[in-house]
Image: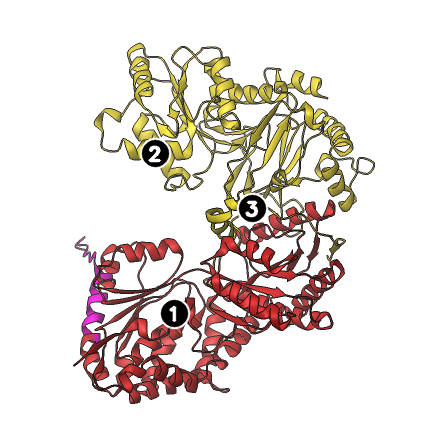
Chain colours: A yellow, B red
Amino acid sequence: VEAELVAWMTETPWQFDDARFEALALDLFAIQFSECPPYAALCRSLGRTPENVTQFQRIPPVPAGAFKEFPLRCFPEEQTIHRFRTSGTSSDRRGVLELDTLALYEASLLSSLRALWLTDLTGQKPVMRFLAASPEEAPDSSLSHMFGTLAQAEGGEGSGFDLVCGELRLDDLMRAVKQAQAEDKPLCVAGTSFAFVHFLDGTAGDPEVFWRLPAGSRLMETGGFKGKSREIPREALRKALGQRFGLAESHIANQYGMTELGSQFYDSTLIDPRGPRRKLGPPWTRVRLIDPITSEEVEHGEAGLIVIHDLANSGSVAAIQTADLGRHVEVDDGPAGFDVLGRAKGAEARGCSIAVDVMLEASRRTVSARQAQGPTKSGPVEKRS
Amino acid sequence: MSGLEIRWPDESGERVRAARGRLEIAKRALAAWPLEERLAAVAEVLADWTRADSPWRRELAISFAEASPFSLGTVSEGLDAALRAWDPACLIDCARRELAPVLENDTLRLAEFDCTAVLAGGALPMPTLLSSLLPLIVGSPVLLRESSKDRVTASLLARSLAARDERLARAFEFLNFPSSDEVALTAFLEAPCVVATGTGETLASVSSRLTQQQRFVGYGHRFSIGIVGAAQPADLEHFAHGFALDTARWDQSGCLSPVVIYLLGLSAADQLRFASACSDALEALSQDMPPGTRSSEEMSGTATERAEAEMRVASGRGALFAGQSSTVVLEADSQPRPAPLHRFLRLMPVATIADLGSALSPFRGVLSNAAIAGLSEAESAEVGHLTSRHDVSRITKPGRLQTPPVDWPHDGMPLLTPLCRFVQSD
């Protein structure tokens, strides 16, 4: 399956083939059911096994939070060659994606970046600056790994990382901007949303940091703010970045991804600047939106919880239920996509009670000394419809 | 058409200043009123709200249910239970207790604040009612900024004050303006005494805007817990019903709502029995107290937590009772987990009181009330000490979490003394 997937990932242009996706998804489901005991237990409890699942939509998704609690891998632990960890935005426990090979992971991320973000700059070796920690500094960050892989494969001389020991160092970025302007060559800048907010705040009022990047330059921001900066609505961030870098908003793309996924999704604006902004992904992924009550797929236009079937997750679980809400976006002449509406916040505090993460925020302050208690005896499942 | 556009950028600020001006005049009459008589008058207003056939409470229930996401059944039951637990005689006793130095000692007198600004938060009516009435007892007029989620309670309270005594009515003003209205907020926070309810961030933000000369009384966001021991296994269903009522009230959205119940030393079979009973009771309560409306985000929060629980249960960790209107998760451990609220109850086993202490330690400072049941006398005493060390301000029984008496020391503070100053004359 992995060989077939790598072959698919290296095809250009991309081939969207539903039958091919379904066949590979079902094959992968059978493998993951067989090799990943916690996933198999979930599937059995839902009565959905490779024997009775014949459509990829019926493959049970695991909640993304399960990566914090279970070793969701399809190979023996000793074969793990790399671990990516979530940033721990909602608890002290961090989700872990274990990999026994980076080949598929890197093939997937490079293919998507080339097709949806680099587009015409693929193979041109533009200079890339990353407002993120380097892979050496943050070896368990999937984002740093992605940027490192991209820089190695597609970055020109002068590419590098501008977040060092948690500090934004802008000298190299400023040098790269001046060089790009002098040579009239496009510059690519990518980073976390909160790093861009720090950049905007830290350089506010500095007339030297009010650039006009050469044509073809582009910017990519990703991830949430994670309490590491003030929060800005995505549209406002895009507008502010457009003004500061002198870029059309079509050339500022948001990436939607998560540590638990091998593939990422990008704003459509670089390949379809006239169409509505929407997230697009590679052919080996499918996005379903489900009703939070019934788990059935929502009608087009309605908001639903985002479920991603990502065949690049061959070594863990390919079907993942996120905690994010989304909406399908159809267009007349172009690929359909989806909008990310935000994170499922759980309950807003109506009275003075504490919602969702606040309990965990409280625990984060003092939990370091405390060890999680061992499990006690458990009871059976009882579900009511 | 002249095309002339008249702008009044600080209209809300002007309204705040005008209200402050009116309250300044009202304060003279309020302060001239003997303390005991003022106390009696406020207690009568409270009685108007708490008596069995209170028209104010009835009107509030209907108006509030229409304007809020809660169902009428939940609002009516919640208001009846909470307000009927407020005994006006208890308020009088509490005031006499707290203000005894003034009432019984000629050398001390009360120096009331010229105005108390009350920044209401959340969407439950009870805190708005009480925090508006208390300053009046100590002779300070009240300027209330309504919560954005409750535009009903203040106007009804104003009418009830007017129906009882004109002096009280004149000493109470309410208004609303957005938090982003800096001019209005600045004028509002110039009051010598400020009472605020909100998140830690809100309280810190308000506090940072005040001078050292101003009095600040802040009530933060907290949550309540339950603790069930193994001493009375025959009563588990009874306890479960009480906790289900505490959870269903106000759809679990107040600081008095239980978010987690710790099962202290219960056998696996009893844990399961209790979880099942909680679920049954919650579902039964939804007949008369239907859950309110929820946003997509709120529904998704529940769905996400249910899905994660389902995954754990499939691997033999805990049990999930996913009902139509509620969720009960029996966890296999006592790790902190998110609380999606909206009748989502977690039950966490702990083997010993020491383990309970470890489980509670992350929550020091954010606990409100604790309901305990099924503990031996010795355990009760030990748990009482333990919870008070974690800032729990009231220990009660299942079914009573949401109905504290009027003199409950909210967030561990006395009711009236934080709202006034004492002056001594030698």
Magenta segment boundaries in residue numbering:
B4-23
The residue depicted at 23 percent of the width and 58 percent of the height is B186
List x then y, in percent, for residue A326: 55, 42
* Relative image position of residue A249 (x, y in whole percent): 38, 29
Report the chain holding disc 2: A
Badge 3 crowding class, 10 Å Cα cut-off, few under 14, some 14 to 19, many 20 or more, is many
What x and y, as percent, mark residue A282? 59, 25
Q: Secondary structure at mark 1?
A: loop
User: Is the residue B140 above or below the residue B314 in the image?
Assistant: below
Front label number (2 vs 3):
2
- Above-or-below relation of B169 to A254: below
**Residue occupying the point 63% across, 29% down:** A98
Mark 3 or mark 2, which is nearer the start of the sequence? 2
Same chain shared by disc 1 and disc 2: no
**Secondary element at image label 2:** helix
Which label is found at residue A198? 2
Residue that numbered label 3 is attached to: A303
Q: CA distance from mark 2 to mark 3?
A: 31 Å
Q: Residues within 10 Å of mark 1 (few under 14, many from 20)?
A: few
Indicate yes or no whether the magenta region holds residue B10: yes
> Disc 3 vs disc 1: which is toward the camera?
1
- Whole-angstrom CA distance, mark 1 to mark 2, is 40 Å
Circle 2: residue type: His
